[in-house]
C-alpha cells in the first residue's frame, strides 16, 4: 500500500544555483513557472554585496528604491506569496537593477486540486516530480521544515506547518500499521 501526500505549495530558489546575483536573466528563470498563493521564493545572495528590495511596478521599471515596500541585505530572504497579483523585486546596489538584477512574478490563486510539493533546482521543472535543493543555509525540503523569513518581506509559515506535519505523520503511521 502506498500513500501519496499532496500539497499545493512550491519553494522556488530564485536563480537556482546562481541565486540572486548579477548576470542572471530572471525573465528567463521565471519563464514557464506558475507562481501560486502559498508558494515561496528563496533569495540567496552575498550579504553586503547585494540587497533585496520589494518595490512598486513604477519603481521596478525605473530601478528606484526610494519608495521600497521592504528591503533586506542579510544574504538570505524567503518571501511567502500570500495573495494573487504581481510582486516586484530589485537589487538596490547602484547599477545592479539596471544590469538586470530584477524579478517580477505574477501570483495566481492557489490550486484547488493541489500538486506535489517541490523545491526547484537547476534543470528541474516547476511541475512534475519532487526534487530538492539547498535554497538557503539551514533549510531543507518543505516536507520536513519551512525556510525561515529573515525580514518583514515575507512571513514564516512554520507555525502552520508543524501541526499539519504532525497530522501527516499520524496518518502515515496509521496507514502503515493497516498495511502491515
Image: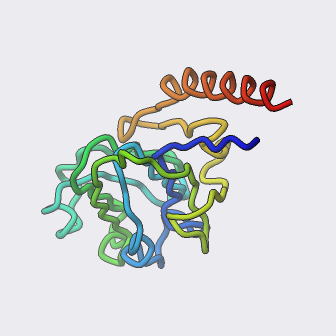
6 relative position to 90: left or right:
right
**Image quadrant where one finds the C terminus:** top right
Of all residues, the one furthest to the right in this rendering is 180
- Residue 126 in the image, given as x and y percentages of width and height: 50, 64
| Quadrant of the rendered image containing residue 16 | bottom right
Q: Residue at x 46, y 46 (%)?
A: 8
Work out whether 4 lies above or below 162.
below
Q: How is the image coloured?
A: rainbow
**Image quadrant where one finds the N terminus:** top right
- Residue 161 in the image, given as x and y percentages of width and height: 53, 29
124 relative position to 8: left or right:
right
Q: Residue at x 36, y 49 (%)?
A: 111
Of all residues, the one furthest to the left in this rendering is 58
Work out whether 173 lies above or below 97.
above
- Residue 148 in the image, given as x and y percentages of width and height: 53, 36
Q: Residue at x 57, y 61 (%)?
A: 120
Work out whether 58 lies above or below 142.
below
90 relative position to 163: left or right:
left
- Residue 169 in the image, given as x and y percentages of width and height: 68, 26
Q: Considering depth in this image, is 105 or 44 the residue closer to the camera?
A: 105
| Quadrant of the rendered image containing residue 153 | top left
Q: Considering depth in this image, is 32 or 1 the residue closer to the camera?
A: 1
5 relative position to 93: left or right:
right
Q: Residue at x 48, y 25 (%)?
A: 160
Amino acid at each position: 500500500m502506498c500513500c501519496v501526500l499532496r500539497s499545493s505549495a512550491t519553494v522556488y530558489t530564485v536563480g537556482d544555483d546562481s541565486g540572486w546575483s548579477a548576470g542572471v536573466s530572471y525573465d528567463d528563470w521565471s519563464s514557464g513557472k506558475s507562481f501560486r498563493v502559498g508558494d515561496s521564493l528563496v533569495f540567496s545572495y552575498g550579504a553586503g554585496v547585494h540587497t533585496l528590495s520589494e518595490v512598486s511596478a513604477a519603481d521596478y521599471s525605473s530601478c528606484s528604491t526610494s519608495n521600497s515596500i521592504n528591503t533586506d541585505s542579510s544574504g538570505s530572504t524567503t518571501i511567502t506569496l500570500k495573495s494573487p497579483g504581481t510582486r516586484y523585486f530589485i537589487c538596490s546596489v547602484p547599477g545592479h537593477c539596471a544590469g538586470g538584477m530584477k524579478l517580477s512574478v505574477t501570483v495566481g490563486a492557489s490550486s484547488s486540486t493541489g500538486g506535489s510539493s517541490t523545491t526547484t533546482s537547476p534543470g528541474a521543472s516547476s511541475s512534475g516530480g519532487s526534487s530538492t535543493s539547498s535554497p538557503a543555509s539551514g533549510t531543507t525540503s518543505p516536507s520536513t521544515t519551512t525556510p525561515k523569513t529573515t525580514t518583514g518581506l515575507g512571513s514564516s509559515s512554520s507555525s502552520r506547518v508543524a501541526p499539519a506535519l504532525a497530522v501527516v505523520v499520524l496518518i502515515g503511521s496509521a496507514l502503515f500499521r493497516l498495511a502491515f
